[in-house]
Amino acid sequence: MKWLELQIKTTAENEDIVSSILYKYGATGLAIEDPNDILELSRTENDWDFIDPDLIDVDFDGIIIKAYYEIDTGIDSIVEKISDEIEVNPVNEGNKPLGIIETYEVDDKNWADNWKKYFSTIVINNHIIIKPSWEDYDEKMGDIVIELDPGMAFGTGSHETTMMCAEALDKHINKNSIVFDVGCGSGILSIIAAKLGANKVTAIDLDSMSIKVSKENVENNKVNEIVNVKHGNLLDAVEGKADIVVANIIAEVLVGMIENLDDYLEENGIFIGSGIISSKINMVKESLLEHNFNIIDLKENNGWACLVATK
């Protein structure tokens, strides 16, 4: 089967709105790549082994969002509508283009292989191992191994934020913890929380593809008795309160969520917020302080930040 791959060169700030437009017009999957992040990781001396830098041509400062559409008689109309909302008549301040669109034809085999090219085994805090389902790993004593099939819910540009959230979960989870994972994506943080010993985890996402992939990954990692995957908008889908709320989403959404966080977080509970670009750290900090949270940790990694707070 032939597919049309739309590549949109855009900025991290426009990631959510561009993704929303692509899904609106029926994208069957998105891949989000930050070439500069990939090159940075390829120069490190740890176990990331993310990608051969020669495979990436970095000619701009931003991210690439790839969307996939089955090629049929209506594809030209879809591309025209997407181009109109992203390039021609974007709804934003100043009507500035949200990105630049390029199109390519791919077949099923090439599409499947492309996922594998951008994802290899990852080691966090020396003992949390995230490995793709198609790779083997020699497990050592004390390792917590998460087998992940990212499929169409995987975003390769979000690895810094995921890693920082995982590190915070590793520090704060105990065997009695109840965790809410807001914007669960492929379910990786929920699975990590469960394997770190959390008693109960609720994974929430608004995207139906993320729900499907998360459920599959939860099942494959045998934590389905701990992790409940739910479709919903932020914390609207949960009941009761959690000891830890982790949210790997953009700063503006975090700020809106913080306003009502008391309704969902136990006294002395921990809030882990990431997905924050460095220029918007103060926005989230101010919101936390305004709502009487104490910021206990702030980490930055390659232009992204993770804040940990409590009351």
Image (tube, helix red, strand yellow):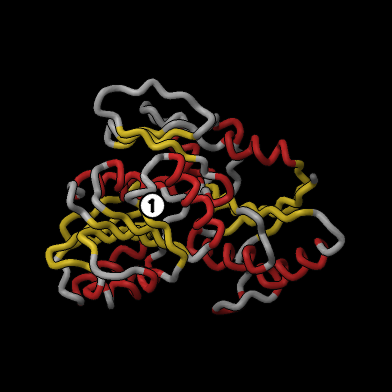
Q: Position of residue 93 (x, y in %)?
A: 54, 79
Does residue 112 appear to the left or right of 158 in the view shown? right
Determine whether the residue tagged by mark 1 lies in a helix, strand or loop: loop
Which residue is more in the foreground, 110 or 287? 110
The correct choice, above or below, for 22 with respect to 126 in the image is below
Q: Quadrant of residue 250?
A: bottom left
Q: Is residue 286 visible?
A: no
Which residue is more in the foreground, 51 or 110? 110
Furthest toward the front, the residue is 225
Q: Position of residue 129 (x, y in %)?
A: 36, 33
Does residue 280 appear to the left or right of 90 in the view shown? left
Q: Position of residue 155 (x, y in %)?
A: 51, 49
Three-letter amino acid code at the position of disc 1: Gly
Residue drawn where x is 24% and y is 61% of the image: 271
The correct choice, above or below, for 142 with respect to 240 in the image is above
Which of the image's four quarters has the C terminus? bottom left
The correct choice, above or below, for 70 with respect to 223 in the image is below
Q: Quadrant of residue 261?
A: bottom left
Residue drawn where x is 76% and y is 41% of the image: 107
Q: Residues within 10 Å of mark 1 (few under 14, many from 20)?
A: few
Which of the image's four quarters has the N terminus? top right
Q: Position of residue 274 (x, y in %)?
A: 34, 57
Q: How many marks are shown on the rendered structure? A: 1
Residue drawn where x is 54% and y is 30% of the image: 134
Does residue 88 appear to the left or right of 218 in the view shown? right
Residue drawn where x is 30% and y is 41% of the image: 195
Q: Which residue is mark 1?
A: 303
Q: Is residue 250 visible?
A: yes
